Structure formats: structure tokens, C-alpha cells
Amino acid sequence: MIDDADARAFAQAYFEAERTRVPIGPLTEAFPDLTLDDAYRIQDALVARLTADGQHPFGIKVGSTSAAAQRRFKTAEPVIGTLFLQRQVANGGAVATERLIAPRIECEIAVRMGADLKGPGVTPDAAEAAFGSLMGAFEIVDARTRDWRIAGIELVADNAINAGFVLGPERPAHGLDAAGVSVMFGREGDRTTYGSGANVMGGPKFVIAWLANWMGARGKTLARGTVVLTGSLSEILPANKGDRFKAEFTPLGEVEVRFD
């Protein structure tokens, strides 16, 4: 296991890569013995560094929640990261590409918790009963590792590669089937792709149950009011300056963003 000084040094490397837009090499090529626990220690140090820099934790992202994502990133389970308030982009607003390296975008369902959840032992039905509201969402992801050469260790250490998010209209969760939410998503002028809430572990309630139990094993509570992004519903698309993206979530409404 790496020590605190090592974790801070790795975190600083990611912090500088984001600040300068000069990506670093894959950690696992230089340090092949790093473990997933090491990666989360680096992530914790990175979150602390970003917070010290004036960013405010806002919510949680859960990534690698589909079989396709787990194959892509060589992960055996989902991963988590921290959302920061300063990285939120208004629905219909613009992402500043000059702060990014090689961004991509994905469409997701966001859950705002209506009650606390504390694992272990949280079931999917108990998780669903704790939903407060649902939103369609975009997540902007941007690997601070050169050429997107990332696997599970890099994914986790780099705060699950989050670079921003967009939240759509907020709907009370009562009476809505999150797994049954469908979405048509694409770049303006290009083909659209279809996605479904069932694509993330069978539905967001399974994601939230996993998250609550993961946090509970570490002595943490998934608190009421927390916003959670539950993972990509369809393919992840590269995003370039001038691109506009739109997602039509049924029945949650539309989410739009452009890259300037």
C-alpha cells in the first residue's frame, strides 16, 4: 500500500495535468503494483487538493455500471468519484473546451436522494424507496492520462475522470420507473443512439444500493439531498469545440449542451 505522501504526489500530478492540459502517462505502466485501494487513496488526496483549491463537493458519480464499461476499463465492479459544484454546466449552456484535454460526453440518469441510506444490507427496493427525484443528465469525462490509456487504476485515481455535468429538469421519483426511462442521445447533425435506465446494472436502484453498501463498508452514509450520477446509458461520444449535444429522456425531459 502506498503511503500518504505518495498518494499526495500522484494526486498532484493529476491536478497539474488538468491545470496545464498536459496529460501524464498511465500510472500502471510506471507502477504496476498499484492496487484499487491505492487508487482510491490517490483519489481522496486529489479531491482534497481540488477542495483546497476552492472547489466544492456537490455529489457523487458512479461509473463503470454497465458490462460494456467494465470490459472497456477492466473493472470488476463500479467505481465512484466526486462531483464538484464548479463543474456543473447549466442545461442548454456551454462547456469551455479550453480547460479540457480530450473530452467525451455520456448521458445518464441522476438521482437526488430523498432519505439517508446506510449500508450494509441496503436492498435495491430500499434504495428505490429512498429516491427523492430523478433527472436526465450529461456527464463530461476527460482522462488526464495520455491518449485515454486508462484502466481501472487510472480511472479511480483520476476521480473517475469526471470533468463536468449537466442536470435536466427535476421530476419527483414517486411513480416513476427509473429502469424504464429511455433516451435518444446524439450530436447535432449526427445519428442518435438509444439508451435505457436498465442499462446500468439493471436500473438505478441497483446502482444506488451498491453505492450505499460500498459507502457503508467504509463507515459513510449516502445522505439525503445527495445527487448521484448512475452511469452511462448508451455510447460515450467524443466532444469537440463547436459540437452540440441533445438527449431526450422519456419521461424526464430534454438535456442540451454545447462545447465552445
Image: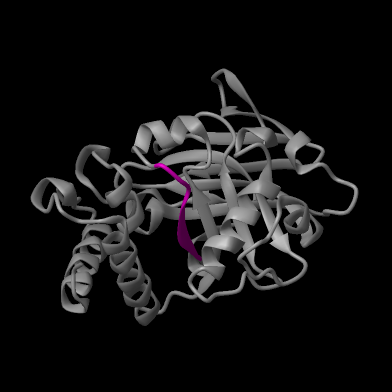
Which residue sits at x=38%, y=71%?
47
Q: Who is closer to the viewer here, 184 or 123?
A: 123
Question: What is the quadrant of residue 247 in the picture?
Answer: top right
User: Image quadrant for the N terminus?
Assistant: bottom left
Q: Position of residue 57 (x, y in %)?
A: 50, 72
Q: Is residue 2 left or right of residue 67?
A: left
Q: Is residue 81 magenta?
A: yes
Residue at the (41%, 79%) spot, across then down: 54
Name which residue lies at 59% across and 35% down.
Answer: 233
Secondary structure mostly seen in the magenta stretch = strand
Q: Is residue 47 left or right of residue 25?
A: right
Residue 177 magenta? no
**Which colour style is shown?**
one colour
Residue 2 location in percent, x, y?
A: 18, 69
> Which residues, given as a range, are shown in magenta?
76-83
Near-viewer residue (189 or 230): 230
Q: Is residue 136 visible?
A: no
Q: What x and y, as percent, mark residue 148? A: 27, 39
Query: What residue is drawn where x is 34% and y is 63%?
Result: 40
Judged from this view, the residue extending furthest toward the top is 191
Q: Residue 80's x, y, as percent?
A: 47, 57
Evaluate whether residue 64 shows in this view: yes
Q: Nearer the viewer, residue 181 or 168?
A: 181
Q: Is residue 164 left or right of residue 125?
A: left
